[in-house]
Amino acid sequence: MEKHSGFEVSNLAPAVPPRLQPETFTETTAGGERDVEMLNALSVDVEDWCQSTFDVKAPITGRVYDNTLRLLELFDRKNTKATFFVLGLVAEAFPKLVEEIYDLGHEIATHGYSHQPIFRQSRREFDHDVRRSIELLESITGEKVLGYRAPDFSVVPSTLWALEVLEELRLLYDSSIFPIRNSRYGIPDWPRQPRRLQSGKVKRLIEFPISTLQLGRTNLPFIGGGYTRLWPSWFMAWGIRRVNREGLPVVIYMHPYEINPQEFDTLEVKIPLQQKIHQRLNRRKVYGKIEKLLGEFMFGPIREVLQRLRFSAQPIAYAPQ
C-alpha cells in the first residue's frame, strides 16, 4: 500500500512481461495465458466551448449538439465506443443527444451539472451539483451512472475531499486527476495507473488518472484536449505505445468543439485575442489526428477497460440503497 497526497492506493493493474509487444498484455483465462491487444480508454467531455474556457454561466448552444454528432459519426465509422462525460446543462438542454449517445452503445458518465470547478464549491454545493447531474442522466438513459470527471481536472490536493463525496454517491470511478505539475490543475506525485482508493470513507472508488509519459521524474502530458493540438500524430502514437508497453491503458480525452475549426466564427461573445490565438492553434488538424489514432489502436469505454483490469464494473454493486 502506498500513500499519495494523503490517500492510500492499491495497485490493481496487471504487470506485463518485457517480452510482449507494446500493444498487448497477458490475460489469464480458463485455458491459461494468452496475449491480447491492449484496450485503451476513449473519453469525451460533452460541453460547449464557453463553459469550458470562457464563462460557466454562458448559455448552451446547438453547436455542442452538432459537434458531438460529428464525433459520433467518426466513432461509428471506426467501430469504436467511448465514455461520454456529459455536462448536466447539456443534458438538460438536449436530452435527445444523451439518448443518441446511449443508443449507439457508448457509456454515459457525468461531468457534473454546471462546469463549476470543485475548488469554487463547498462540499454541500459539490454534492448537489454532481447528484443533480446523475439524476438527470439516469432519468434519460434508465441506467446507473458509474463515472465522473471534474471540470478543469479540479480534483487537486485541496479538493481531495471530493472523492469522498463521489464514494457517497455510489460512483464506481473518477477520472479527474492529472498527475502533472500545472498552474491550473494536477497532482504530480499521483500514480499514473488506475488504482482503487482506500482511505477514510473512500473504500471502493477507482481513480483512472489522465495519461502521461514518465520521463525521468517528470510526467509529461502528451494526448488529449490542447495537447492533441500541440503534439504531432507520430508523437502521440509513440506515447501510447510506450505507456502500453508498461502494461497501462491510455485514457484519451477530448471535447466536441475541438473538431470544429470554425467554432470561434459563430460565437456570440467577445473573446480576448490571446485566448483566441491559443485556442485556434492547430485546431483544423484535430479531427484527422483522432481519426488516425482510432485506426492504429483499440479503444473502448472506461468501464470496459476497468473490467479488463479485473475491476468489478457491475452497476449492481453500487446501486443506491
Image (cartoon, grey):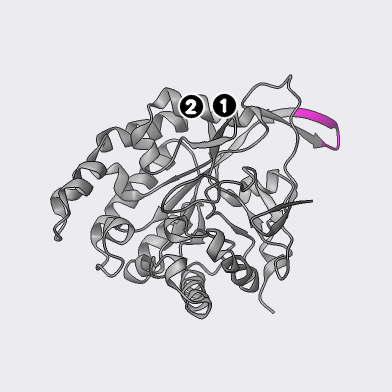
Q: Which residues are magenta?
A: 29-34
Magenta-colored segment: predominant secondary structure = strand
Asked which quadrant contains residue 171, the reply is bottom right
Residue 203 percent location from the top left of the image? 74, 64
Q: Amino acid at mark 2?
A: Ala
Tell me the quadrant of the picture where the C terminus can be found: bottom right
Sort mark 1 into few (<14), some (14-19) or many (20+) by Cα contacts within 10 Å: many
Q: Is residue 316 above or below residue 216?
A: below
Query: Quick one: 101 or 256, which is closer to the camera?
Result: 256
**Residue depicted at x 49% and y 74%:** 126
Numbered disc 1: secondary structure: helix
Q: Answer with left or right where residue 136 lies relative to residue 143.
A: left
Q: In screen coordinates, is 224 left or right of 57?
A: right
Alpha carbons under labels 2 and 1: distance apart: 6 Å
Residue at the spot 27% in from the left edge and 38% down from the top edge: 283
In the picture, the disc for residue 237 is 2
Residue position for label 1: 241
Q: Measuring 74% from the left and 19% from the top, which residue is drawn there?
A: 19
Q: Quadrant of residue 41?
A: top right
User: In the rendered structure, which amino acid carries the disc numbered 1?
Assistant: Arg
Residue sitting at x 63%, y 33%: 38
Q: Secondary structure at mark 2?
A: helix
Q: Nearer the viewer, residue 246 or 136?
A: 246
Please determine whether, in this image, residue 98 is positioned above or below residue 181. Answer: below
Residue 93: % across, % down: 32, 69
Instruction: Check if mark 2's residue and mark 1's residue have beta carbons within 8 Å.
Output: yes
Asked if residue 300 lies left or right of residue 2, the reply is left
